[in-house]
């Protein structure tokens, strides 16, 4: 139970910190943090939780990561579903808190940092561009995670490497899809936006998971007998 609660807390922090920075701080006139600040915020949530709860739950914070680690031989099949439920609940609670805060000055939630493609992509990118972006970046993310946490790696720096990888992922893909690589993060925002966000949500569930599966299998093959 402690592992599941830790995953819920960690995913709460990822959504609250990452999406919160996009909603509350990115667009402030003259002092807004912009894409760079939001990218760094997402990375920092992972770094901080990796060291806070990594020894309790592994700090997956992401259903795609959980599935990828399972496929890669790093995680027990019996805990996959409970982890995913905990992550989704944590993300939804964070989105609920952000909803209250964002509307606290009478503002509408707008796109609420939801993921999207086409007219809902920050840069107007197509569905196909969004699919490929989410697939490739989640694949590489799994390779980084599995490599950084390998028994022969410098594991004390794993959290930093993984957090910086997520920062880089956001620097690349915020203009394309607003960056998912995490179905729990996508679900949490889409539920509150409804409409187009829920209609497009399948892309941000299917393609991060597909990328994670390929990434897990690829690293398992690369590591061979050491894995």
Image: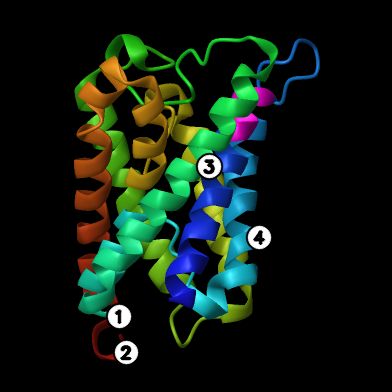
The answer to the question of whether label 2 and label 1 lie on touching residues, with beta carbons closer than 8 A, is yes
Label 3: which secondary element:
helix
Depth check, mark 1 against mark 3: the one in front is: 3
Q: Which residues are magenta?
A: 20-24
Choose the circle earlier in sequence order: 2 or 3: 3
Label 4: which secondary element:
helix
Choose the circle earlier in sequence order: 2 or 4: 4
Residue situated in front as seen by the camera: 40 or 221? 40
Quarter placement of the C terminus: bottom left
Residue situated in front as seen by the camera: 94 or 61? 94
Choose the circle earlier in sequence order: 3 or 4: 4
How far apart in space, not on screen, are marks 2 and 1 (Cα)?
A: 5 Å
How far apart in space, not on screen, are marks 2 and 4 (Cα)?
A: 28 Å
Depth check, mark 4 against mark 1: the one in front is: 4
Q: Which mark is residue 226?
A: 2
Q: Which mark is residue 150?
A: none
Depth check, mark 2 against mark 3: the one in front is: 3
């Amino acid at each position: 139970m402690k592992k599941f609660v830790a995953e819920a807390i960690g995913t709460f922090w990822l959504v609250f910190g990452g999406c919160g920075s996009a909603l509350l701080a990115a667009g402030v006139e003259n002092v807004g943090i912009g894409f760079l600040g939001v990218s760094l915020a997402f990375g920092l949530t992972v770094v901080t939780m990796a060291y806070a709860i990594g020894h309790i739950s592994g700090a997956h914070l992401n259903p795609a990561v959980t599935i990828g680690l399972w496929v890669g031989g790093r995680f027990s099949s019996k805990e996959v579903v409970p982890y995913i439920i905990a992550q989704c609940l944590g993300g939804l609670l964070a989105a609920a808190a952000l909803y209250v805060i964002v509307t606290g000055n009478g503002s509408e939630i707008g796109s609420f940092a939801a993921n999207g493609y086409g007219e809902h992509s920050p840069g107007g990118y197509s569905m196909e561009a969004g699919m490929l972006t989410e697939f490739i970046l989640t694949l590489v993310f799994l390779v980084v995670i599995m490599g950084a946490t390998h028994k022969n790696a410098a594991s004390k720096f794993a959290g930093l490497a993984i957090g910086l990888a997520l920062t880089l992922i956001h620097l690349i893909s915020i203009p394309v899809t607003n960056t998912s690589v995490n179905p729990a993060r996508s679900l949490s925002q889409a539920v509150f936006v409804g409409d187009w966000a829920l209609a497009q949500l399948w892309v941000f569930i299917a393609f991060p998971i597909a990328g994670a599966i390929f990434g897990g299998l690829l690293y398992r093959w690369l590591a061979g007998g050491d894995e």
